[in-house]
Amino acid sequence: MSAIPQDKRLALVVFGAAVAIAIAAYGIFRGFGDPDVPSDAVAIVEDVPGEEGTITQEEFDRGLEQTAARAGLEEVPEPGSRDYDNLEQAAMGDLLDTVWIQGEAEDRGLTVPQSQVDDQLEQIKSQSFRSEREFQQFLERSGFIEEDIVERVKLQLLSDEIESSVSETAVPVSDDQVEEFYDAGESQFEQPETRDVRLILNEDRDRVLAAQQALEQDDSDSAWETVAKRYSSDPSSRNNGGLREGLTEGLLERELDRGVFAAPRGELQGPIQTPLGFYVFEVENVTPPRTPEFAELRGQIKGQLEQVAQQDAFARFVDDYGSKWQARTFCASEYLVDRCHNFEGTGHPPTAQPQCYEEDPRGGRPDCPASVLQTQPVLPGSVSVLNPAGTRLPQTPHPAGAVQPAPTGLPGAVPGAPPQVGAPPGTP
C-alpha cells in the first residue's frame, strides 16, 4: 500500500505560540484551595458540562500512544527520557485543547448538529482515503478509534464556530478610516514603470547577430514570431515572438536590465552579453509609473482594515481564553504542564538545560534557547505538534504607520477548510 501524503495526516487541535505567551507568566503562580484530581484522572477542568471536564488516565494513555504514532514512533519512549517528556507535553496539550474548546463553545452557547459532523467526516474520508479499508488500516496503525476521529471533526467545527463568534466582535471600519489609510501611505501604492519587450537569446553570438540582421530588415510581429522560433533559446518567449510583457526594473539580468530600461521605444538594440548568453531586444511598449486613485483602492483597503480588525479581536480573545481556562484547569502532580493552574514553573523554556541558568556551569554553557519567545506571525492553522513553530507568514510592505496583521484562526484550525485525516508519518 502506498503512503498517504503527510499533509493528510490527522492533526489534533493544539495551541501555538500566542496562547503559550498569554499564559506563561500566569502559570508560575499557584491558587489556593485547588480541587483534588481523582485517582483515575490526570486533570480536571472546571465549568465544563457533563464528564467532559475530566481527563482520565485511560484517555491520557491512549493520547500518548496516538501522539507517538503521529510523530512516526513505533512505541512510546521510556518515561524520564526527553522524547517521553516531549510527547507527554504534546499529549496533555491535545487533551486540554479538546476540553477547553468544548468548554468555550458551551460558554458561548455554540453547538454543531451531529448531521454536520457526519457529513464532514464523510467528506474527509473521501478526500483522504481511497477506500473504507484504507481508512480502517489507518485507524489500526495510528492508535485512533473512529470515535476519536468523530470527536476531532466536531472539535474542528466548534473551533470554526468560535472563530466566527469572535470575528463578530471586531470593531467596524469606517469610510474615514479607509481614506486616512490611503492618505497616510499614498506614495507606497505607486505602481512602477513596466515595459513590454521582444528579445532573442542565444549563447552563440553569431546566431544572435543573424537574428538581428533579419529583424533589421523586418521587425513586424510576424517577423519576430519567425525569428524567435529559429534563433532564440529563451524558453519563456521563443514561442510567442520573443515577447516578455509587464517587466519591471530589476527582474532581468543586470546587463540586460540596464539596457532595456534605458532604451527608447521601437528601436532594435544589442547584442548585449550576459551570463546566460547574448541578447538583441526591442522595447515594444512603456507603461509609466502611476498611483491608483483612492476610488480604485477603496474596496481593497477596506477589506485589509476589516481583516486587521478581526485579527485584533481574535488576539484579544486568545489572551482572555488562555487565562480563563488555565484558571479552571488542575492537573495531577505527575502530569503538570504550564497550562495547569497548579503548575509551578521557573519561566524558563521547557527545552532548556538547567546549566543554561547557572552562573558558572561546570563544563561550559550548553547550547541554550533564546530567552525571548518567538512572536513572529505564522500561517493560520500551521501550528501543530509536528510543527510547533508554525509556517512563518511572508513579510510584506505596508504604508507608514499601518497596523501589521496578526495571524487569525483558532490555533490548529484553518477557516473554511475541513480538518484533514491521514496516516501518521512513516506509515507504509
Image: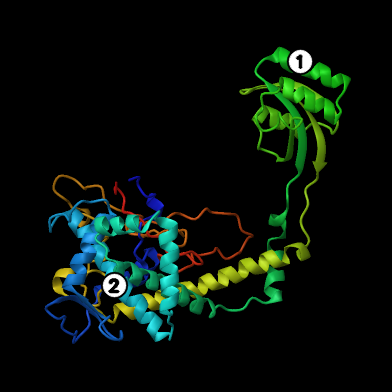
Dot label at residue 96: 2
Name which of mark 2 and mark 1 comes first in the sequence.
2
State the image coordinates of residue 281 (x, y, percent, origin top left). 77, 27
The image quadrant of residue 333 is bottom left
Residue at the image position 73 percent from the left and 53 percent from the top? 190
Residue at the image position 29 percent from the left and 49 percent from the top? 427
Looking at this view, is 376 or 96 the one in front? 96
Q: Is residue 99 left or right of residue 215?
A: left
Residue where numbered disc 1 is placed: 209
User: 421 above or below 31?
Assistant: above
User: 210 above or below 300?
Assistant: above
Quadrant including the N terminus: top left
Q: Is residue 116 left or right of residue 285?
A: left
Looking at this view, is 128 or 133 the one in front? 133
Q: In this view, does 79 lie to the left or right of 144?
A: left
Residue at the image position 57 percent from the left and 54 percent from the top? 396
Q: Element type at marker 1?
A: helix
